Image (cartoon, rainbow, N blue to C red):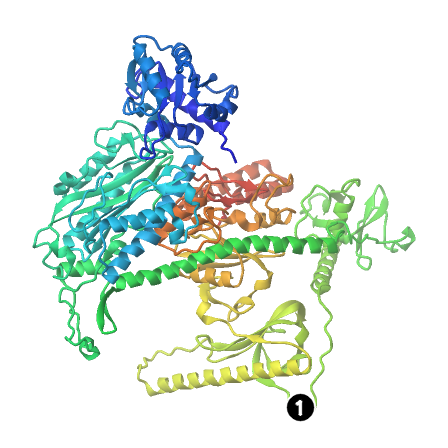
Amino acid sequence: MAPQVDVSRFYNRLGKVHAHFVKHRDGGAWGGATAVSLNRGALDEDKIFVKSIIIQQYLFGYELPETIIILTYSGKVLILGTKKKIEFLQPIVGKAPSSSSIKDVKLLLRNKTDENAENFLTMLKDGEMVEGTKVGVFLKEKGGNEGASMVVGWEKAMDSAKVTYVDISAGVSLAMSIKEDMELDLLKKASVLSNKVLKHGVIPRIEEIIDSELSVTHEAVATEIDAMIEDPSKINLKVPKEHVQSCYFPIVQSGGDYDIKISAQSSNKPFKYDIILASLGARYQMYCSNVCRTFLVDPPKKVSQTYETLLSLQGICLENMVPGRPLKAVYLAAVKYLKNSGNDNLIKHLPKNLGFATGLDFRESSLVLNPKNPAVFRPDMVFVLTVGFVGLPLSSEDKSSVSSKSASKNLETFALLVGDMVTITTSQSEVLTKHSKDLSDISYTINDEDGDASSSDGSGAARSKKKKRAPDGDEAYARSVATSQVEDTYVNGTRQRKSTRLAGQNSSAEAHEGKVEREKRQVALMARKNEERLRELARAKSGKKDSDDPTKGADELVTYEKTKEYPEFVLPNQVKVDMARECIILPICGNPVPFHISTVKNVVLPDPDAAAYLRLNFYSAGATLGKDTPVNIVRLVQKYAPFATFIREMTFRSLDPQSLTHAYRQILELRKRCRQRELRELEEANLVKQEKLIRTKNERVPRLSDLTMRPVFAGKKTQGNLEAHTNGLRFISTRHEILDIMYNNIKYAIFQPCESEIMVLVHFHLRNPILVGRKRQKDIQFYTEVIDASLQVDGGRRSMADPDEMDDEQRERQLRKRLNEAFKEFCRKVENVARKNGHTIEFDIPYRDLGFYGTPSKEMVTVQPTLHCLINLTETPFFVVDLGEVDHVHFERVTFMSKAFDIVLINKNFTMNPWRVDMIPSNEKDSIQEWLTDMEISYTEGPMNLNWKQIMITVAGDDRFYMNTHEDEVTEKDAGWEFLRMFGKDDEEGEDDDEDDSHYSENQSEEAGSDESEEDESDFDSESEESDYDGDEDLEEQGMDWEEMEREAAADDRKKRRQGGDDESDGGRRKKKQRMGAAPQRRRGSAAQQRRGGVPQQRRGSAGQQRRRR
């Protein structure tokens, strides 16, 4: 496909350059130029960072050799080039936006016949270049275009016109310094590329060289690193090779010969195992990045302490890289910190600058972090921050504690260097290359001071006698911070040195690799689950097309067919109650009119004075129908609301209070009876008629005796025996109460042996509820206590060696073992009986090693998973979550500051409230997420609690919830529960350091790294990211304390008292509750929290969530 110029980007960026030129023309950056001449000579692959190439890549996205661009103060643009270049640029002619400062673009075709003399005259005339006119050029490039005849001719034409040249390099750099969103994204990807090469290429190679004691040169190692950048597939990173290249040849230094300038070179000297400096830079789609690290091998204490100072110094620099401050503030703050911390001796070892701005140009010379630069930090600038010390002396005393075998013993001077990519946000700076630089991660110990004591023949017996004395002094400090020891391994009788610090990193990488893989699986799982749920909902919808009609199934209320059926006690002007027909007969205009009792919302009998009053409120359209409203009344109101007239209230007055009082009492009694009947019918509505139990005959029936059943029939305890029969289980209590549980109705059977609990139990989770007493139950449990739940504590003290207490403990252990065996044997027999009679039942045992503490109800309990459920069965109410009914799991209050978090398990039936487990210790999060991934249950996490009632209402009403587009099928949205992601769909990792590579390839395999690198890699494929986010802090900012809430409540009460009226007060309370329940939005960065249909969304870079008030 032929290259094409992006017209809108061209005018946008050229307009930005022109606006800066117009605004700051009289300053030093533009030198008072009247016009600007951007000349690009012949193609030269050795010059990749010259300004003429940078500005062309910025404007056109391509390099255009032998092309001249003239930009005037008034906004005219003239471009002289060859035929192909003019054809490429033709789409921009006449396409200038009305709002753009660029007024006209004229293309001039190169003319070889007159050697462009006519074109040059046109450019001089339109550019208003006359004698004495100041013309802006790149002075460093002027006169260096001998191979480009057209550019040379143009320079001669300007010389003939006697114009004055001024350098505009600084002006162009400043105009390009504030990056667009697309540029920031490419810079983040370039930073991740450098970070990946460092983590998966440089560090493993250096460790391999040290562990294997290889003899290589610095240049050879640098060549290998350069090859990794040019071909990322060498580190299993599937990036198109044409998109990447090195910014410079990598720099690797060791052995005491150090140069921390960016222009340093890797020498041909041998690689030493002492203090190793490594610097590399990668370009991704022409945008640059840089990262520098120092690695310490057997470091003396002075080196380690100086490195710690260096890290603190970098932190100070980052604190001063904020919008509004001058660039020189960074260097001055660094010097001030060294003075105040008592490290004045390190000031003279600082480099001349601490970094520079970067982008398409690797080093912007006008935006250098030196002590004199007055330029100001602005949002969306990107810098390379390189902090280091060079030429630091290392005396013999400093090296006294270092092993004589260590290469660090030979150092006379040393240097330290740390460099990172830093972007300036609206309020602070953010590091893009987040690979760990802590001392414990870059320090290695491979030699002990006392050496290796082994026999000359290398016998294993002699090696086993080798002892390492306790570390002390400087060596102890270095070894402790490096968290490493030395191990000697022997292969074919030859000793090979191997650092456990290096070996330990492999195991750590493997652990993180599992975390990365889990996050990848979660992203794919979420997409697959969305498709499955769409198919399930489509099938369910086709099976019940008319079931969503709320008025379907409404039963008409009939009290009397005819007036002749009225009871004899009805009088024209009296309120009467017919208990048999369940109605109230009210006099209206002298005529008795019956009203069914279920239409009465409430009845009020105020205290009588001269007369008695009876007020009846009825259910009506437009009024709130509470959850206690009969279902049939709700359906009838919805059915007749569009066209019927409703009576909302009726009040009756009587001089005889006894008559109204009697009617009032009868109405209350009748309403009570009807309500009880409705509740009973509701309890029995969904009950499935069970088959009759077939008792086993002529065989021995498996039986467990002396069991306690929960829930109980009546009273405090229900005890009895449990038997296994042909098609079900039968429990017979000591009071001869019988409960049958059919095998076909058992969904999950769970056997929980007694280990740390006080009981051993079997639990049955049913498919359909059954009646126990008068309540529907889906969970039935039978247990035996090993010890009494409450023990009497006498006043006497008992010794730990008391024989009686030891006997009690022994008896308890034996009882536990005996009961566990009895219950286990009973479960095995039940399985056999069921299998024998054509039924299937298997008892699950909870996985104790996957259990965790949490609060599903009111108490902190141990929650354990089984094969099909998540359970707690020792405390009531039982917590049994069928994993097959879980649609998604969300982790709440997940922050670095929180010691505990909550999980919400969302039911596939959106009309049901989600299950919750609160106050789970934070160290359990990874194991829970690993288990959920193994069970193929998707999860997300966020920093705060959500208003799940509102979320479920909104989700239940969204027919396109699991689709990734809105109603127009074009506008994209988050599919399913993707909106709950704290970092967004494309991030694919809240704490994962490898998902950023999804921009390169969705199926690449790579190792995982430290937590710091996890965040930077999420930026690789993000369009807008949210960095470190403290949910607890957000809660503190947004929530009201008790005093504020009480003041607001008191003010509301005073307001309601002034207004008066019961209905108005009710409405006021409802409005108040709505205000108190409303969850605020929080802006994060520059992206406002988004909300879809009342449901808070979390995208990458936005963490808006509704908060639950407590």
Q: Nearer the viewer, residue 421 or 991?
A: 421
Residue at position x 36%, y 59% from top? 509
Q: Name the residue at the top extreme.
A: 131
Q: Residue 711: horizontal and vertical position, in percent? A: 59, 71
Q: Let me know if residue 910 appears in the view.
A: no
SS type, badge 1: loop
Q: Residue 387: horizontal and vertical position, in percent? A: 23, 41
Which residue in the structure is indicated by mark 1?
Answer: 699
Q: Is residue 1024 left or right of residue 598?
A: left
Residue at position x 92%, y 53% from top? 564
Q: Residue 632: horizontal and vertical position, in percent? A: 75, 53
Three-letter amino acid code of the residue under disc 1 = Glu
Check disc 1: other Cα within 10 Å, few if <14, some if 14-19, many if 20+. few
Q: Name the residue at the left extreme.
A: 396
Q: Quadrant of residue 722?
A: bottom right
Q: Quadrant of residue 555?
A: bottom right
Q: Nearer the viewer, residue 245 or 911?
A: 245
